[in-house]
Image: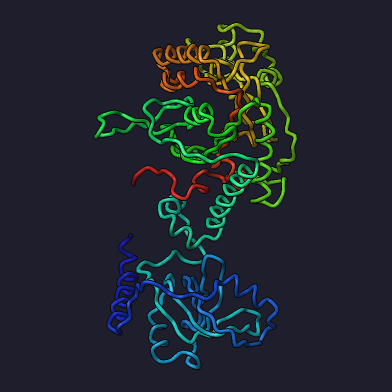
Amino acid sequence: MSTGDDPLRAARLGKLDSLRARGIEPYPRSFARTDEAAALEERHVALAPGMETGDRVRVAGRVLASRNSGMFIDLHDASGKVQVFNHKDYLDGDGLAILRLIDIGDVIGVEGKIRRTPRGELTINAEALTILAKSLRPLPEKYHGLADIELRYRQRYVDLIVNVGSRETLRRRSRLIAALRRHLWDHGYVEVETPMLHTIQGGASAKPFITHHNALDIDLYLRIAPELHLKRLIVGGLSDRLFEINRCFRNEGLSPRHNPEFTSLELYEAYVDYTAMMDLTEELVVCAAKEVTGGMVIEYGGTTIDLTPPWPRRGMADLVREATGVDFLALDTAAAREAANALGAGLHESAGWGHALEAAFAAKVEDRLLRPTHVTGFPRDISPLAKADPADPRLVERFETYIYGWEVANAFTELNDPADQRARFAAQMEARAAGDEEAQPLDEDYVTALEFGLPPCGGLGIGIDRLVMLLTDSPSIRDVIAFPTLRPR
């Protein structure tokens, strides 16, 4: 807080003292409301301008505007706004004294009767005022709001008070998650929770956060994905369809699309392959879009995007060939690496064929996929948990879904051959030994679980944060996470 704010805070502290001197507790325990602002407006929608009612109500909220020395107050609650009229014709001496001690930002309770002003504003003629929480710091100036973007994220509580758009974005996020959950429940999926602390990092290729358990004296990893534990539950027969919506953690950089902790939906269904997951991805995204936007055509960053299924299904190598003229399927490892570097990939000399294809895709194709597209034909090198493509052993049955050039979903036909899985882990261990910190180590217990028999199944992961960004036209992931990770000041 700057020095210039001190006189304002001092004035509010003086009012706090004055309230207590009058025997008024400025932070009471409760207030019995009868209504919220939106319910009042709905109930009296037919009330004509200039008309009064005998409807006595008790409402509570935050004072966000005051006019004519407090004669008119805009009181905001979570549902909306109602105007409060404060006048000596209705308020007694104590009420008028409290009015003089109210500041913008205070949380108050109001009791009185409803009327509609001649200008059409639904209004409460206040007969009693109650201080519910005295605000000791001034809010940002009304017409400029919270202009410091960084401060918006650091003091999200202030951002939410003054920015209606920020509140609506996070409310839409809540509705989106609820819609996805309902859709899965309605289709027979069982919701589960799996560990956040893992003894072995796994389930995705990423650098983990490491913590230490004092009692066991062991290092643990904040999970980078729930995949291996969820598939253990499929092995155990808990359900043929299950899902989890929860946090994952990856010790990577920050960007408008990346936060170290993020929310994902991950699900598994027995006896289907990755093509069923494509259909389900479309169902879930459309379900979310209808809940948040009311339709299947959205606007993001000035671009119109039609989410109407079915979405194109295109092979990664085909997309790269169309964009660059280079057919990676016709190249060996050395030639593929050379071609990818010529396209700007900057690969290490130990990079494999699959890494070269992926790098070329990232450099020349990914950000052009504005229309929803399922990209198939992923390299085996970078997909240690997916079943191999029987037509080409270099590839696997995996897809990623791209919208506006962003990956929003990732899915496999799950690898369920324990011998093949052990070999894939061995290859990952070799990559780790060569310096790849994101390669997955051997999870012996997971291989043991596969030896008991994992049914054929499809698995899908959807990034909730990016999906919310797309459906709310939010430019940064920080806009859709209530408390994003920030560098300490």
Q: Position of residue 331 (x, y in %)?
A: 63, 7
Residue in view at x 66 percent, y 80 percent: 120
Q: Is residue 275 above or below residue 463?
A: above
Can I make out residue 363 in this image?
no
Q: Is residue 168 above or below residue 414?
A: below
Camera-side residue: 160 or 6?
A: 160
- Color encoding of the figure: rainbow
Indicate the quadrant containing the N terminus: top left, top right, bottom left or bottom right. bottom left
Q: How many numbered marks appear?
A: 0
Q: Is residue 407 above or below residue 97?
A: above
Residue in view at x 62 percent, y 79 percent: 121
Q: Position of residue 175 (x, y in %)?
A: 59, 52
Quadrant position of residue 398: top right
Q: Is residue 218 above or below residue 159?
A: above
Quadrant position of residue 136: bottom left
Residue in view at x 41 percent, y 75 percent: 103
Given the current orientation, which residue lies at the most extreme bottom position?
89
Camera-side residue: 441 or 233?
A: 233
Residue in view at x 32 percent, y 74 percent: 11
Horizontally, residue 309 falls left or right of residue 174, namely right
Q: Position of residue 393 (x, y in %)?
A: 62, 10
Quadrant position of residue 362: top right
Q: Position of residue 264 (x, y in %)?
A: 52, 38
Can I make out residue 159 in this image?
yes
Camera-side residue: 194 or 370?
A: 194
